[in-house]
Amino acid sequence: MRFAMRWRRSLVLGLAAAVFCAGSAFAQNVSLAERIQLCASCHGEDGSSRIEKIPSLAGQPEFRVLVQLILMREGVRKVETMEAIVKDMKDDEMDALAKHFAKLPPKPSGEPIDASLVRRGAVLAKQRNCVSCHLPTLAGQQQIPRLAKQRVDYLIQALKEFRDSKRSGSDTLMNGAVAGLSDADLTALAHYAASR
Ligand code: HEC
Ligand code: HEC
């Protein structure tokens, strides 16, 4: 009786291990190149997005991309369109993707940039000292994203989310930076940042 139970238990464990191995073997069959191709369908062929409100990834700090992918996989930052994509991804696959996008040269999105908004945005950015975290080039660092050459529409949306405390799982460092700014101020900041 005891023997039978032990045998059943090891059979179950064995089966679970077999299923697990088959699962990970399947996941590993998705090559990095295939993953990148999938990302490209939304984030652009060269990591520079041509789609409204989808951010460019080219030239983003490596650590920034890695952390956001992990946060999305864990459901801390909720991005519906990306849920299924990150669900089964391993840390080392995310790491390889982060390294890939960090190396690509950022390019302007081609959206119209308004020179007077850029001037107004520059004044606001100075008052709020955006460069203290995002760096003088606005290229970002560590977990802090690149703003330079990012899409204008995405920047406006992101800034509103921070001001209105609507971005799930976000770092609170940003909330103070945009507190009390109007929609027009945020639009000006977005034009300024995208123009860098
Ligand atoms: C179906 C479209 C789609 C696909 C495919 C996709 N993404 Fe995204 N991704 C989005 C959208 C939309 C957002 C912006 C979410 C938001 O508004 O906060 C996003 C955001 C991100 C961000 C956060 C950027 C930032 O600056 O905060 C990263 C990093 C990212 N995606 C990486 C990837 C990677 C890597 C892949 C491929 C494995 C991928 N995405 C595939 C739609 C997609
Ligand atoms: C105290 C440091 C700090 C300051 C000052 C700061 N930021 Fe940020 N910013 C961050 C951090 C950290 C994040 C990442 C937040 C997250 O995704 O959780 C961020 C994210 C952003 C994003 C989101 C970009 C993306 O890819 O999703 C935008 C846009 C942004 N900042 C614009 C600005 C602007 C404009 C200013 C000045 C008005 C500013 N920031 C000042 C730290 C800062």
Image: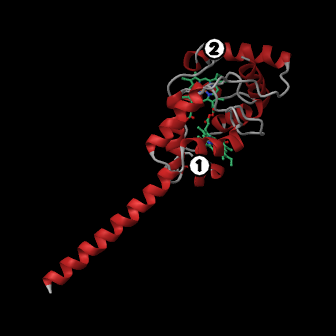
Q: Could you say where residue 80 lies in the image, as x and y percent from the top left?
A: 64, 52
183 lies above or below 105: below
Q: Secondary structure at mark 1?
A: loop
| Point 65% across, 43% down: residue | 37
Q: Look at the image and tell me whether residue 172 can be seen.
A: no
User: Mark 2 or mark 1: which comes first in sequence?
Assistant: 1
Instruction: Look at the image and tell me in which quarter the C terminus lies.
Output: top right
| Point 66% across, 13% down: residue | 126
Q: Could you say where residue 76 lies in the image, as x and y percent from the top left?
A: 52, 47
Identify the residue position indicated by label 1 in the image: 78
Q: Quadrant of residue 128?
A: top right
The quadrant of the picture showing ligand 2 is: top right
Q: CA distance from mark 2 to mark 1?
A: 29 Å
Q: Quadrant of residue 187?
A: top right
The three-letter code of the residue at mark 2 reads Thr
Identify the residue position indicated by label 2 in the image: 137
Name the front one of labels 2 and 1: 2
Q: Could you say where residue 63 lies in the image, as x and y percent from the top left?
A: 49, 30
- Disc 1 crowd rating (10 Å Cα; few below 14, some 14-19, many 20+) is some
Q: Look at the image and tell me whether residue 33 can be seen.
A: yes
Query: Can you tell me whether the CB of the residue at mark 2 lies under 8 Å from the nearest atom of ligand 2?
Result: no
53 lies above or below 62: below
Q: Secondary structure at mark 2?
A: loop
> Which of the pair 50/74 is nearer the observer?
50
Most extreme residue toward the left is 2
Q: Could you say where residue 55 lies in the image, as x and y percent from the top left?
A: 68, 35
Colour scheme in use? secondary structure
| Point 43% across, 56% down: residue | 24
> Which of the pair 60/103 is nearer the observer?
103
The three-letter code of the residue at mark 1 reads Lys
- Disc 2 crowd rating (10 Å Cα; few below 14, some 14-19, many 20+) is few
63 lies above or below 78: above
